[in-house]
Image (cartoon, grey):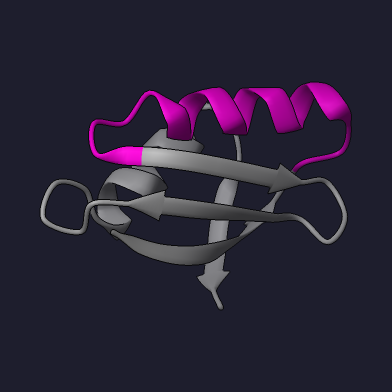
Amino acid sequence: MKTTTLIITGMTCQMCVKHVTRALEDLTGVSEVQVELEPGTAVVTYDSNTVGMQAFENAVSEAGYQITGSA
């Protein structure tokens, strides 16, 4: 398992956090998600053989937000 921190823009409220969390948790291969409104990050633990950055970007985009980087 691998862990990455995604920097997400567009989240303005707790409902946004719920949308991003749900979108990332629904991806196959993701085992844990922790989204924080401040500083606008999502810490994701996942199987790198199953899911990758493009899947994260697609899921977050479909939820209405954008990944602007990773730490």
Examine the residues drawn in magenta and state their main secondary structure: helix
Quarter of the image where one finds residue 12: top right
Which stretch is magenta? Answer: 11-30
Horizontal arrangement in the rendering, residue 46 relative to residue 70 (left or right): left
Please name the residue shown 38% across and 39% down the image: 31
Quick one: quadrant of the N terminus?
A: bottom left
- For residue 2: magenta? no
Horizontal arrangement in the rendering, residue 12 relative to residue 25 (left or right): right
Please name the residue shown 38% across and 47% down the image: 56
Please name the residue shown 54% across and 23% down the image: 22
Q: Is residue 4 visible?
A: yes
Q: Is residue 62 visible?
A: no
Please name the residue shown 69% across and 24% down the image: 18
Image position, residue 16 (x, y; %): 75, 29
- For residue 13: magenta? yes
Image position, residue 30 (x, y; %): 34, 40
Quick one: quadrant of the C terminus?
A: bottom right
When the figure is inspected, residue 13 is found, relative to residue 69, above or below; the finding is above
Image position, residue 62 (x, y; %): 45, 28
When the figure is inspected, residue 35 is found, relative to residue 43, above or below; the finding is above
Numbered-mark total: 0
> 53 or 10, which is in the foreground?
53
Name the residue furthest left: 49
